[in-house]
Image (cartoon, coloured by chain):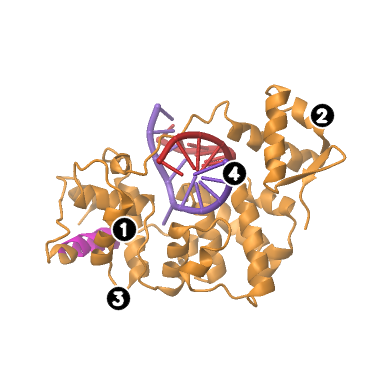
Chain colours: A orange, B purple, C red
Amino acid sequence: MAGADLLSGEIVFSPDDPDAAGHFNRMLREFYRQNRRPMPWRVNLSPYRVLVSEMMLQQTQVSRVTQKFPGFIAVFPDFQTLGVASLEDILRSWQGLGYNRRAKYLQAIARTVTDKWNGELPDDPAVLETLPGIGKATAGSIVTFTWNYPLVFIETNVRRVFLYHFFPGKDPVPDREIYPVIERMLDRSNPREWYYAVMDYGAFLSGRVSNPNRRSSHYAVQSPFGGSDRQVRGGIIRMLLSHGPMPREDLVRRCGTDETRSGDILSRMINEGILKDNSSIISFVEV
DNA sequence: ATCCAGTCCG
DNA sequence: CGGACTGGAT
């Protein structure tokens, strides 16, 4: 079934229909056969590569991660290398992905894996969730994609597909109602490929139908980027990466916003452990 | 304007 | 629970 055929009319599946799983998965398989998206982290599967890709993919488009992932892996090929790298070097390779805290988390995770777990990433999602920057969705993704275990997790593409086909018109829908439906539909013979397919289909749906995720209980509109604290933070990171350590005064003045505000933002970044202040010289944290 | 393989903090 | 966190493509 070509992608366009899927949109000729909204196909509604009833979660209670005993044949729903068969029908849904037949449709999904046919879509996937013709529309699968090749991605660097779907080949050469290793716990490290999957972890890095999943951290990068949080709130970040596939197209952007596709551009950054190979270079990052080339510079930091394994847990060991990433663990001993400086945050500055990691952020340099991270630039353009945004949400810099994730890079900090990733470094902390690499250190835990090498220092405490003998270089092995656990295959237990509950253990993974104790790591910084890893919640339910990322833990489920990592374990399913690395080890092909049949876990149930929800991220934006999965949510979109299930809202579209199983909860048409219902508003709002909490994830708690979606989990059992996924549980019933999940192809336990190959969960990895099944999630690949659902996610590719969800991405395909994006933009072609009015976003079903707006009917999720967990949907929130985000504030505009222009003029936001996030934009100022991005500027600070960029400035420090190009100039090296800078006096606090200079940095705050060159943020392009009033100095009280930029000072507050800077303090927050220091609190988060991204930057440090040594007698009013601002730089990235070390070791 | 909208939204992207979410998580954390208060 | 609400809000913060990135930056770019469309």
Asked if badges 2 and 4 are on one and the same chain, I answer yes
Q: Which mark is residue A249?
A: 2
**Which one is closest to the eye, mark 2 or mark 4?**
2
**How far apart are the two marked residues, 1 and 3, measured between alpha carbons?**
15 Å
**How far apart are the two marked residues, 3 and 4, measured between alpha carbons?**
37 Å
**How far apart are the two marked residues, 2 and 4, measured between alpha carbons?**
26 Å
Residue under label 3, please give it: A189
Image coordinates for residue A132, horizontal then vertical, percent:
58, 58
**Which one is closest to the eye, mark 3 or mark 4?**
3
Residue under label 4, please give it: A96
Do callouts 3 and 4 mark residues in contact (Cβ within 8 Å)?
Answer: no
Residue under label 1, please give it: A198
Asked if badges 3 and 2 are on one and the same chain, I answer yes
**Which one is closest to the eye, mark 3 or mark 2?**
2
| Sequence-first tag of 2 and 4 | 4
* Along the line of sight, the residue nearer the viewer: A153 or A158: A153
Q: Amino acid at mark 1?
A: Val
Image coordinates for residue A143, horizontal then vertical, percent:
45, 69
Asked if badges 4 and 1 are on one and the same chain, I answer yes
Chain where mark 4 sits: A
| Sequence-first tag of 2 and 1 | 1
> Can you say which quadrant of the picture contains the C terminus of chain A?
bottom right
Residue at point 26%, 54% (across, down): A177
